Image (cartoon, coloured by chain):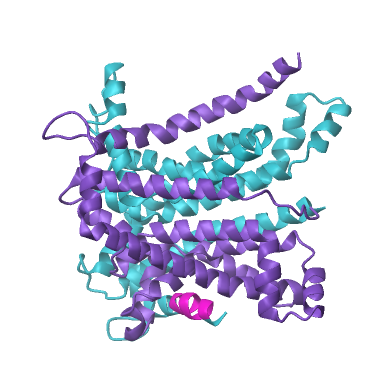
Chain colours: A cyan, B purple
Amino acid sequence: MLIVGYFFLFPIFRLVYVSFMSNEHTFTFSNFETAFKDPYRTGFLNSIKIGIFSAAIAAIPGAVAAYFIETRGSSKLRRTIAVMSGVLANTGGIPLAFMFYAALGIQGKLTQFIKFLGWDIYAGQFSLGSFVGLLIVYLYFQLPLMVIVFSPAIVSLRKEWSEAARNLGANQFNYWMRIGIPLLFPSFIASFLLLFASGFSAYATANALTVGNLPLTPLQIGGLLDGNVSASQLNLGKALGVVMIVISALAVIPYLVIQRRSARWQKL
Amino acid sequence: MAKAMKLRQQFPLVITLLLLTLFVFIPMISAFEYSIRTPLEGGYGWTHYLWAIREEEFFHYIFRSGWLAGVTVLITLIILVPTMTWLHVSKSPVRPVIDGISLLPLVIPVVAFAVGAQISFPEFVQNTVFELPFLYFVLSLPYAYRSLDIGLNSIPLKTITEAARSSGANWIKTISTVIIPVIRSSVMATIALTFALSIGEYTLTVLLHWDTFPTWVTYVAQDNILGAIAISMMSLIIPFLILTTITLFIPERSIQGRK
């Protein structure tokens, strides 16, 4: 407990505390004022946008995939998928960037294939370092993450319920509209929020793919921390960090509440 | 008839798997194709892989990341298993609080955590690479805690510990020879998760100015891009193979707990 306290809670409290300090160690809000002005404001908006979009695009296919894998797959298959999703959800940074350069870069395999089919994706503004490019790359770890976090909800859907519904005369469609979707919906929203937090705070991948052309909060914090970016306010980076924590908390706390609630009825 | 039914049932699964496979492997295979190109002679070969293995730093960093991850796993198990056993047995009122704390790292973006770590530890902590395993432990806490929690919930823990204690085992013995073997599948899952997370951790490491395998790959990429791709491929495929082998060889949980 002490170790958790020292290595985890202490840095966070200290971060919050220091974020209110001016350069002369007096109390101030000015760090936060700067944090909400450009370029940092754009950074937050972009980060939030990429969090929402990448979560929204990954959520439904991930949920459907989780459903078929959990209900139809054999135990070996399920365990392999679980491991694979675990590894894939943790990919990021340079390795992930390489894979996408190889596939969707200017000389990429997939790019050439699509071009062969008559569509040059590089004809317009597209590049992997752009917002859309980053979004596609993020899906590579968001989708497996969705499979991981949504699978437990699928497992808790009991076969008895579908049988009971069928006995009462429901067809497949009725079952899904009246029972399946309402039951899974809270978990679905919860998973969505978690995915948002993950896309919102991803650093390594964004760092590898963008070259400073797309302002994102994690990159800005990293820049401030490394001293690459000069800022008149020494503690600006800390204030950005605190704002990130608040945004991410707003997303994750509902997730935890929903999880706890659904855990309760799943036990019944 | 029955076979046709089964086929119809399997059909959506097959489609799902097919799409997932395409999605996962197209980028992977494209990268692999790059990594075996030999631009000088044309054609293909293992040049870049051999190059990587011959680099002195390759094994240096693999070894370093490996032992850091190993230490993280040890820390995680040594801290979590006894604490959680105690929490489960004693029905202590602090348990909800600790449950909550264990999930907090999900809320804190790693970048923000790195900033916090940088400003709050005294010099002597920041100067030793041993700070990393403790920080990795924090990052993996939500996953490790969850998976151990599931394991401990699924066994009649109280009965088992009481039996062990009344047969004369002390706490250390109870935990190491009774509890860990009983929940071995969730212990293994914890090990796998923690290990995978710490061996691939990049953000925190680079922001605190340490060099490990993932940060080294980034460094290599600056002057030998194909070599770096080769290394990246290995860094993806090797953990995947190890973890798959581990999970497929562990027998399924023998005690099916109350649901």
Is residue B236 part of the magenta span, yes or no?
Answer: no
Q: Please say whether residue A133 is visible from this viewpoint.
A: yes
Q: Main secondary structure of the magenta part?
A: helix
Task: Give B128 or A134, whichever is nearer the viewer.
Answer: B128
Residue sticking out furthest to the right: A168
Task: Give B145 or A245, whichever is nearer the viewer.
Answer: B145
Could you tell me residue A142's position as x and y percent?
47, 45
In-image side of A87 versus A260 (left or right): left
Quadrant of the frame with the N terminus of chain A: bottom right
Could you tell me residue A217's position as x and y percent?
35, 58
Q: Is residue A253 above or below residue A57?
A: below
Residue sticking out furthest to the left: B40
Q: Is residue B107 above or below residue B168?
A: above
Is residue A8 part of the magenta span, yes or no?
Answer: yes
Residue at position x 54%, y 52% from top?
A194
Residue at position x 68%, y 61% from top?
B183
Residue at position x 40%, y 66% from top?
B67
Q: Please report the bounds of the magenta region as a residue range.
A: A3-12
Could you tell me residue B226's position as x and y percent?
21, 42
Q: Please say whether residue A211 is visible from this viewpoint.
A: no
